[in-house]
Image (spheres, rainbow, N blue to C red):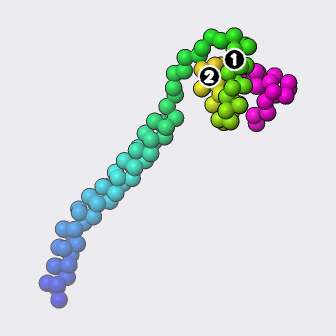
Amino acid sequence: MPNVMLQEYTKARQTEPLDRVEEKLDRLMGKVEELSAMVRRMLATQEQVVVLRTLSREDAKEEIVRLFESGDVMDYEDLAQRLQLDLRVVVDICRELASEGVIEELL
């Protein structure tokens, strides 16, 4: 019986370092997954450089109306990006056009 106990003890001692390595590997893989998720989020939210156009207010109004007529308008930010205009200008013009009944105001 003592020989069997010695064999079990020896086997346990031999597998202990392997268990520790597996635990460390599991922790490292968890960290890699966390870092991968962080990188994906950073890439998804990466800022874009937008060059704004200089356009007269009347020309901007006409372009905004055309986009509304196309039915392909999502929101103010979408309009500003597609027209390459300052967001504040787009919102102001849209509110003006909505008050005139030319377009429906975006929420």
* Relative horizontal placement of residue 58, taking residue 42 as reference (left or right): right
What residue is rendered at 27% in x and 64% in y? 19
Residue 100 position within the rendered picture, expressed as x and y whole percent measured from the top left:
85, 24
Q: In which quarter of the image is residue 7?
A: bottom left
Give the residue number, with chain letter if any, for mark 2: 83
As drawn, which residue projects farthest toward the left?
3
Residue 20 position within the rendered picture, expressed as x and y whole percent measured from the top left:
28, 60
Q: In which quarter of the image is residue 75?
A: top right
What residue is rendered at 26% in x and 58% in y? 21
Name the amino acid, label 1.
Ala
Q: Is residue 73 visible?
A: no
Residue 96 position within the rendered picture, expressed as x and y whole percent measured from the top left:
81, 22
What residue is rendered at 54% in x and 21% in y? 50
Name the amino acid, label 2.
Leu
Give the magenta part as a residue range.
89-107
Of the numbered discs in the image, which one, if any, rests on residue 5?
none
* Relative horizontal placement of residue 7, taking residue 95 as reference (left or right): left
Give the residue number, with chain letter if any, for mark 1: 60
Screen quadrant of the N terminus: bottom left
In the structure shown, which secondary structural element does the residue marked by tag 1 occupy?
A: helix
Q: What's the distance in space between the residues labelled 1 and 2, CA to CA?
A: 8 Å
What residue is rendered at 81% in x and 27% in y? 102
* Relative horizontal placement of residue 18, taking residue 83 as reference (left or right): left
In the structure shown, which secondary structural element does the residue marked by tag 2 occupy?
A: helix
Please give the count of numbered marks on the rendered protein. Answer: 2
Question: Decide: marks 1, 2 in contact (CB < 8 A)?
Answer: yes
Q: Is residue 95 above or below residue 14?
A: above
Q: Between residues 2 and 19, which one lies in front from this camera angle?
A: 19
Q: Earlier in the sequence, mark 1 or mark 2?
A: 1
Q: In this view, does 65 lie above or below 52?
A: below
78 drawn magenta: no
